[in-house]
Amino acid sequence: MLTIERAMVDRIVAHARADHPDEACGVIAGALGSDRPTRFIPMVNAERSPTFYRFDSHEQLKVWREMDDRDEEPVVIYHSHTATEAYPSRTDISYAAEPNAHYVLVSTRDDDSTEFRSYRILDGEVTEEEVTVVESYV
Amino acid sequence: MAIEVRIPTILRNLTGGDKAVEGKGGTLDELFGDLDTRHPGLRDRLVDDKGLRKFVNVYLNDEDVRFLGGLETSVADGDSVTILPAVAGG
């Protein structure tokens, strides 16, 4: 299950809406082992595409080092689908390589509602999980 | 002196859980070959018959080796190599 603050959900949705019709992507870091996404990091989609996304490799190195220095890990890795449902595509599954991450997908295909779903992706296997939105972790 | 190689979570099952390992070689390709003798299977996760796998990013110090010489990039004692899974999809 993913437990996430409403403010974080709002920021993911706002990022996805702002970049629509291109896919938006990013990370929410959290303390190692805490399973709590607390530090929102929007990333550049190096593909700038409505059908693909890829973290810019230099930005990723910088962000991953920063997490290392702060004893954090990527608790959430999110991206948007802009014309299809919020379900991992074949490419999403083949790239997924952070065993501890919640893979969040949002869909901006409808103007007035944003689908928000979360998955674990391990060794090519997708498991959807419940999302619990809280006002605050404390 | 050796070359330090930082290993991402997903590959630490091949390094006994170690976050960083050391190796030697004059090029990245030789370095990966050297690492594979102590961490069998590691090279195969990084390289296929066309070169570096597209699923991984490899950095020499701060530079993405795709912008250097790929597997032929020269490496030397004291260098630091970082491996990260590429984050991408559709």
Image (cartoon, helix red, strand yellow):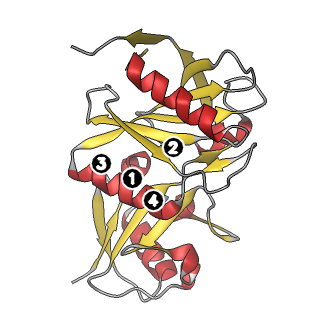
Q: In which image quadrant can residue A46 be found? A: bottom right
In front of the other: label 3 or label 1?
Answer: 3
In front of the other: label 3 or label 2?
Answer: 3
The secondary structure type at the circle numbered 1 is loop
Q: Are marks 1 and 2 in contact (CB under 8 Å)?
A: yes
Residue furthest to the right in view is A83
Looking at the rendered structure, whether the residues under marks 1 and 2 are on a common chain is answered as no
Q: For mark 1, does the 10 Å Cα neighbourhood hold few (<14), some (14 to 19), or many (20 or more) residues?
A: some
Q: In which image quadrant can residue A123 be found? A: top right
Chain ID of residue with mark 1 = B
Q: Amino acid at mark 2?
A: Ala
Looking at the rendered structure, whether the residues under marks 2 and 4 are on a common chain is answered as yes
What residue would you read off at disc 2? A97
Q: How many marks?
A: 4
What residue would you read off at disc 3? A67
What residue would you read off at disc 1? B8
What residue would you read off at disc 4? A59
Q: Amino acid at mark 1?
A: Pro
Side (left or right) of A101 relative to B44: left
Is residue B40 visible to us here? Answer: no
In front of the other: label 2 or label 4?
Answer: 4
Q: CA–CA distance between discs 4 and 3? A: 12 Å
The residue shown at (41%, 25%) is: A8
